[in-house]
Image: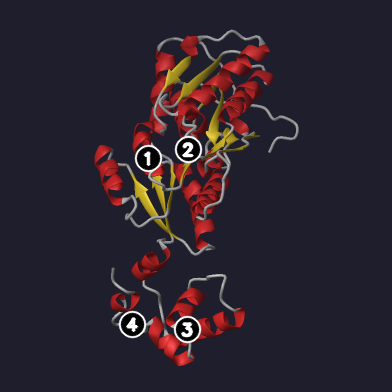
């Protein structure tokens, strides 16, 4: 195994600092690595000398000496989902105030990207822990990493993969909030445009929608449900199928804001007014929701907070601390013009 001196041949070395201070190389190394068994005054002398020498620790040497890379991985399906950037902002804010760096991976290219990711990570893959929002089909491979000792925290989908610690939001309650709000406004034929059913969050939102109908004594009609993609075009297509089928509906609850914006577009093209003819509620509260025409009523996911919490959890796990296996952050109703009414106290 190469020594730190061998790795850092062209830069100031720990030996140089130790010689200038009359200290052992081991003491200097412990001071620079934040070990608790170094006198504070000595640590200050070492840090000052390192700054004067322009010493920068080799990341390879640091990994060899500490067993850590001080790097976290974030794995996401794509960066094109607008809400993903809010999660990333929460992750980045925590990382920037820590000693860690962040490596970002995506699986936008499907199986090829997934194989490349798995080939890069592992015991020698350069990351200490992993935060992920990942297609369900990849979770068995992530399980292998976790069983190999890598701390893993999943954002969302927690209830469907209990083997992973995770941060989620109250998707079922959010679905119930959306449908209940529409029911309170007098809507009774509430269509639901759901996202891909392989995602547990969508199954939960659908369950909340059904629960609200049941609690209000409104019969569930499967003809009012259409599955689609998490995109504006997916919302356009699903709403178009409802319209073409001649299904009567006076409200739409969409499982994402982009789908809801697409639904409003399809309704306008069909000559239906939002909210007079059809009220619309989305899910996420992405920035575009407030800019839609009309502004979109939605269920807010605490996306930034979820990113922060997941990062803090994985850092704690890397440090050997016990962490929560389930953390759920609450959704909230944000009422705007697309639903045709406002509840007292709503934001």
Res 51 label: 3
Q: Quarter of the image for the N terminus: give it.
A: bottom left
Location of mark 2 (residue): 164
Disc with the residue nearer the chain's start (2 vs 3):
3
Quarter placement of the C terminus: top right
**Gap between marks 2 and 3 measured at Cα:** 42 Å
In terms of sequence position, does the residue under pointer 3 or pointer 1 come before the other?
3
Which of the 4 image quarters holds residue 210? Answer: top right
**Label 1, label 2: how far apart the Cα atoms are:** 9 Å
CA gap, disc 4 and disc 2 = 42 Å
Q: Return the residue at label 1.
A: 142
Query: How many residues crowd mark 3 within 10 Å: few (<14), some (14–19), many (20+)?
Result: few
Q: Which residue is mark 4?
A: 11
- Please tell me whether residue 249 is drawn above or below residue 181 in the rendered image: above
Q: Are marks 1 and 2 in contact (CB under 8 Å)?
A: yes
Residue 85, percent across and down?
46, 48
Q: Are marks 2 and 3 in contact (CB under 8 Å)?
A: no
For the residues labelled 3 and 1, say whether their Cβ atoms are less than 8 Å apart: no
Q: Secondary structure at mark 4?
A: loop
How far apart are the alpha carbons under marks 1 and 4?
38 Å
Mark 3 residue element: helix
Q: Which badge, 4 or 3, comes first in the chain's sequence?
A: 4
> Residue 123's spot in the image, x, y percent?
34, 52
Mark 1 or mark 2: whose residue is earlier in sequence: 1
181 vs 331, nearest the viewer: 331
Above or below residue 96? Residue 132 is: above
- N-terminal-most mark, 4 or 2: 4
Quadrant in the rendering for residue 70 = bottom left
């Amino acid at each position: 195994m190469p020594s730190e001196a061998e790795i850092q041949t062209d830069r100031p070395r720990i030996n140089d600092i130790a010689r200038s201070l009359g200290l052992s190389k081991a003491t200097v190394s412990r001071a620079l690595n934040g070990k608790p068994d170094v006198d504070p005054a000595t640590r200050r002398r070492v840090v000052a000398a390192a700054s004067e020498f322009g010493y920068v620790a080799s990341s390879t040497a640091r990994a060899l000496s500490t067993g850590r890379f001080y790097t976290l991985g974030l794995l996401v399906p794509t960066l094109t989902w607008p809400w993903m950037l809010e999660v990333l902002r929460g992750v980045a804010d925590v990382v920037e105030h820590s000693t860690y760096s962040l490596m970002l991976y995506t699986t936008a290219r499907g199986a090829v990207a997934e194989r490349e990711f798995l080939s890069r990570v592992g015991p020698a893959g350069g990351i200490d822990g992993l935060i992920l929002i990942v297609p369900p089909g990849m979770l068995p491979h992530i399980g292998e990493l976790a069983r190999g000792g890598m701390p893993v925290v999943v954002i969302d989908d927690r209830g469907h993969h209990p083997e992973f610690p995770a941060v989620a939001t109250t998707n079922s309650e959010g679905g119930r909030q959306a449908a209940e709000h529409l029911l309170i406004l007098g809507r009774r034929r509430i269509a639901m445009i759901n996202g891909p059913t392989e995602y547990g969050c969508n199954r939960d939102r659908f369950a909340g929608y059904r629960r609200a109908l049941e609690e209000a004594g409104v019969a569930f009609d499967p003809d009012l449900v259409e599955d689609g993609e998490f995109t504006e075009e997916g919302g356009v297509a699903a709403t178009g199928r409802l319209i073409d089928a001649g299904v009567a509906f006076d409200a739409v609850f969409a499982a994402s804001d982009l789908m809801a914006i697409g639904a409003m577009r399809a309704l306008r093209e069909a000559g239906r007014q939002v909210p007079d003819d059809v009220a619309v509620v989305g899910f996420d509260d992405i920035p575009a929701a407030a800019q839609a025409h009309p502004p979109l009523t939605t269920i807010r996911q605490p996306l930034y907070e979820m990113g922060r919490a997941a990062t803090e959890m994985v850092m704690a796990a890397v440090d050997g601390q016990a962490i929560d296996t389930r953390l759920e952050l609450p959704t909230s109703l944000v009422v705007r013009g697309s639903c045709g009414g406002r509840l007292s106290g709503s934001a």
